[in-house]
Amino acid sequence: MRPARTHHPDHRSQRQLARPFSALWRATRRPAPARGDAPSGGAGVRRHFAAGVPVLIIAAVALLALTGGTGMSWLPLLAVGPALAAATSGPWGVLRIGALAVGLGAAIGVHAGTSDRELAIVLSALSAVTLASTLASALRRRRERVLAAVRSVAEAAQHAFLKPVPSTVGHFQAAVRYSAAAAEARIGGDLYALVPTPFGIRLIVGDVRGKGLPAVGVAALVLGVFREAAYDEPDLLDVVHRIERSLARNLGPDDFVTAVIAGYPDADRMELVNCGHAAPLLVQDAGVLPVEPARPTPPLGLRALADETPSLQEVALADGNQLLFYTDGVTEARDHEREFYPLRERLALHLSEDPSRTLAALHEDLLTHVGGELHDDAAMLLLRKPAAAPAAPSGVDEPAVRHPSRPVAAE
């Protein structure tokens, strides 16, 4: 991150007072952008239209003043032009709009035979509004640059925190879709990771209590421990125990993490450990089925408050089967009638052989369901086991979810 600048305390107040005017000076001295930087497409059309609205307002006021027969009565409304331009244009654009307003005001005042004193008052007011709007535009541009820098840092943090998932991992095609509730931050309390290890691919999808930036630290802790343990521990349950021990040392009394940790140790089964999280959805010939845990397990960080330990379950995967992991930000998203998003039904509707296409369709459908804006972090990770070669036998047993009676020792 950018280091903070230090100033001598004797000059701090003077620098703060001078900062807005220095920002105005730098903004007005900045050269016009090159043609290659000009906006294009629909965004460029909207920007040019917004920049032209102040000119239209000034022209309308001037027309009313000339045709309405009231002389100077309409001229104060010319200040609307530069005031509105401060929200849509740069400092030079505001100055041009203000100069146009002052020039038209002077011409209309002279044409109407207005006294010098009254005309000077109106023109002074227009000039003052123009200068204030120019300063406001310079400060707005400065805040936009700061926001752009913060967003670039957030994007870099997201790539380190939530690393991109390759389209093919081990035996699977994979895709992920993530949306943070804090839209400008780009990261939040939902977490995911998919890593190849000596023990097969392993993944985690989880949800930290809370949302937005306050939950990022806990999510980063869980992902860091998972990535280390996934490479070191042959047993998937030992990976869960490592995460649990780390959270017990670092979480607050009211914090916890729901998560599904999964591994693929061989070519026909997926191991799952569900710690209070939403059940993954298994896509097979029989339809879309939730993989419910055989025994409820408390979320990570709450094991000390419950007498339950994680249990391991296995899911048999045939060629062409898919497994969707997600967070409650997806299933608890509501529409304007307060209806939850029917993920299971919509997954069956948008299913395809390309996981990235499936998640893109689900994401767009989810945004349509909520009206365009999510109010909670939402993550989806989809795995698909590609179909076998044509020479493979076509009679494949229907996959089923089985819960082996494996003893699990409490820590």
Image: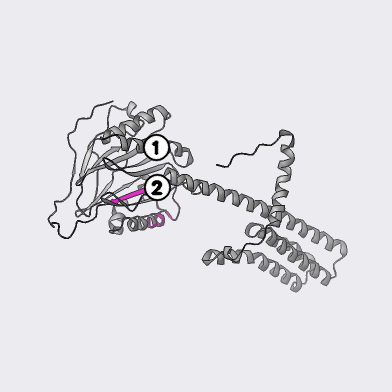
Q: State left or right for residue 398 relative to residue 54.
A: left
Question: Image quadrant for the C terminus?
Answer: top left
Residue tagged 1 = 224
Quarter of the image for residue 403 reads top left
**How far from the left and from the top, in percent, is residue 17?**
73, 43
**Could you tell me the amino acid type at mark 2?**
Ala
The stretch of residues the image draws in magenta is 364-383
Nearer to us of marks 2 and 1 is 1
Count residues near mark 2 (Cα–Cα under 10 Å), then give few for <14, some for 14-19, many for 20+: many
Quarter of the image for residue 48 reads bottom right
Q: Nearer the viewer, residue 118 or 328?
A: 328
**Could you tell me the amino acid type at mark 1?**
Gly
- Tag 1, which secondary structure? helix
Q: Is residue 23 above or below residue 106?
A: above
Quarter of the image for residue 100 reads bottom right
What colouring style does the render use?
one colour
Q: Residue at x 28, y 32 (%)?
A: 238
Residue tagged 2 = 378
Q: Nearer the viewer, residue 339 or 384?
A: 384
